Image (cartoon, coloured by chain):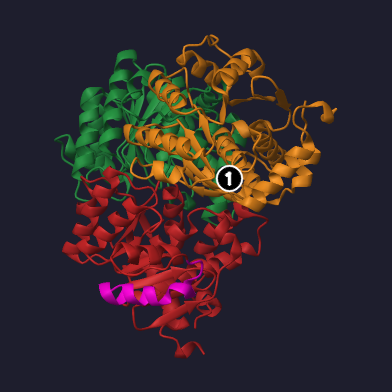
Chain colours: A orange, B green, C red
Amino acid sequence: MAEHTPVSPRQVGEAVQRLREGSPLVQSLTNIVVAQWTANVLLAAGAAPAMVDNPHEAGLFAQVAGGVLVNTGTPYDDTTAAMRAAVQGAAQTGTPWVLDPVAAGGLPWRTQVASELIGVHAPAIVRGNASEVSGLLGGLGGRGVDSAARPEEVLEQARSLARDHGTVVAVSGPVDHLTDGERLVRVANGHELMTRVTGVGCALGALMAGFAAVCEDRLVAATAATALLCVAAERAAAATRGPGSFAVALLDELALVTPDEVAEAVRLS
Amino acid sequence: MAEHTPVSPRQVGEAVQRLREGSPLVQSLTNIVVAQWTANVLLAAGAAPAMVDNPHEAGLFAQVAGGVLVNTGTPYDDTTAAMRAAVQGAAQTGTPWVLDPVAAGGLPWRTQVASELIGVHAPAIVRGNASEVSGLLGGLGGRGVDSAARPEEVLEQARSLARDHGTVVAVSGPVDHLTDGERLVRVANGHELMTRVTGVGCALGALMAGFAAVCEDRLVAATAATALLCVAAERAAAATRGPGSFAVALLDELALVTPDEVAEAVRLS
Amino acid sequence: MAEHTPVSPRQVGEAVQRLREGSPLVQSLTNIVVAQWTANVLLAAGAAPAMVDNPHEAGLFAQVAGGVLVNTGTPYDDTTAAMRAAVQGAAQTGTPWVLDPVAAGGLPWRTQVASELIGVHAPAIVRGNASEVSGLLGGLGGRGVDSAARPEEVLEQARSLARDHGTVVAVSGPVDHLTDGERLVRVANGHELMTRVTGVGCALGALMAGFAAVCEDRLVAATAATALLCVAAERAAAATRGPGSFAVALLDELALVTPDEVAEAVRLS
């Protein structure tokens, strides 16, 4: 079955291998809740995190980074100015950037911030849950849905967003749905404990920025990031009692799982 | 004995049950040190954390949150403006908010910030250690004590603060003392390792905001939060070597302990 | 051999003992990525962390702190103003402060910020990796090196920086090199996993601020901090699977290792 999907398990394994070998520099402009966790996830997976999120330096750094993450979890005037600078810097050098529009739709100010960033320069990948993807589309003048809990419910919105902006849209949920507007990949891995630890979704966005630095095909990049995190989570959950020990084991597994093991365990459709 | 206390173990167990079932949305305006930890404690306990702490959105979000935490651990001009907006928003909708006046008394600026917030709209609960409660009262024009290490030493100050502002005051220490100005509850649970991990007290304030969302009687809310955290800490300490493994086990136990187990283990007087 | 080194294992053990007994108050103006981790490392080691990093209070607090850490990991306009206030406050009372010039050299703005802080009042200790020490020297008008991966490559720059500013310079790497411009100490402890967890170097800077509060001789302070962290890391690595469990065990070991065990395990030259 796997050979009929737009992204194959073999491509996923090769991408994980490239991340480990390339150790791309990932600039993360993210929120105060998950900054440490995000850096540790990137380090465990084999990437090199750098949190340069002030307006004086963010644009300059985006020009030397391998990938840039912009996450709107706790935006401030100062850090949103840095986000704009980072996206402009990324545009100049063609550095791929990933948008994680946390709480888009629910909160008007950050929805506008996220929409404006897309207008500056299209992201390589947009990652969010169903309601964020729908909310972001609404902020861009498109038609969102009233409320959505599962990726399946916003699939048309995701395709539309991807086509209109030439980006990959990755919708997280029990089964992750990823599309570039034409192709669709579903990743059916993961574990319920991923929702009991803060920042697992945010860390996925950061991983996507790392994979985008080493994969020309951004649908492959987004799929590989999802596969690595979800397969590591399944392995971690097998040996833990609750959310505290799960988070610790997830970092261990991100470092220990091999590219072949990810390719073997990923369930694509 | 328990049946003669203002809050009973049965009420504590029922409150924990309500927190798990209601999964209240807790807006946390807290410090950069404990933001991740606070979110993970809330998630483990069964609440839903949201860190909306910028002036553009904090007031709006406080109107839809179940409870709001304001913690003055690392205040900045930008985030204190957000705190004011959040308290004003909470006042409009009657959303209960919890004040954790970190380092009040010791540092004049934040003492003034905390005092002004109380003036905007009275918090449902004030949580601090003995010197913070005393320092906050001093900032409000009352008479603090020169120095205080134990809750017993500021009991009169706590009662006065509670009565003057129609709030519950929870003073943390070896034995926690909680009062609404009339009633007094002591919780004699906990473990010394709670003082070797940063943010355990801050997380208690966040849990109180969660319980305040599901308990009309705020003395019950504050007592249940204290009981849940301290009982989980006792269980965690039994299986750990030092502060690192204790913090991990505490998150596990917050998720695993049942309402009945909390009610059984809590030592109220 | 140890008796011929400028700092002896016995001095290291005594310094660890003093840190535990004195529990110095360490004001940390650090970055959003490592704030929690830094506080937990200080608490585990026996010091008392306080993150006072706003311009209204930082100068006042530096006058009562035992030591001050300034780390330029995620500088903003607001927090760099606080850094200046803290250094000015430290200057008034002679409070020792430690500069951790994260990414100095690579990013012009923060290099200038760090250079200006040194001009306000010389730090007791500068801690960084090889490229940061070289970059900082370049920012101060000295001659850095084009690129440097190992402390040995910047030893002359470190000596020059130390002599010019009357400070101790600690260069982290596989073998840490510490100098006051005349004396040189090498610490050959540690583990590769220290590079797979974010903020281990940042935490070392914080520990140095704690040791500077209890050790007149700052070369002893910097050496003892390095020894404690690296010996604890070796013990932690022995019992862990990957970076997640390593970070947890490191906090445990920082609390459990005895002064005598540090003195016995440290490899000085």
Q: Quadrant of residue C5?
A: bottom left
Residue A158 horizontal/vertical position (percent)? 60, 18
Q: Which quadrant is the C terminus of chain A positioned in? A: top right
From where the camera sits, is residue C101 visible? yes
Nearest the viewer among C147 and C62 is C147
Q: Residue at x 73, y 32 (%)?
A: A189
From where the camera sits, is residue B1 visible? no
The disc numbered 1 marks a residue on which chain?
A
Residue A153 horizontal/vertical position (percent)? 64, 13
Nearest the viewer among B234 and A152 is A152
Q: Which residues are magenta?
A: C148-167
Q: Which quadrant is the N terminus of chain A positioned in? A: top right
Magenta stretch holds residue C153: yes
Residue at far right of view: A1
Which secondary structure type mostly characterizes the magenta part of the structure?
A: helix
Residue A260 horizontal/vertical position (percent)? 79, 46
Q: Residue at x 68, y 34 (%)?
A: A220
Q: Amino acid at mark 1?
A: Val
Residue labelled with disc 1: A41
Q: Is residue B29 above or below residue A180?
A: below
Q: Is residue A1 above or below residue B248?
A: above
Q: Is residue C70 above or below residue B190?
A: below
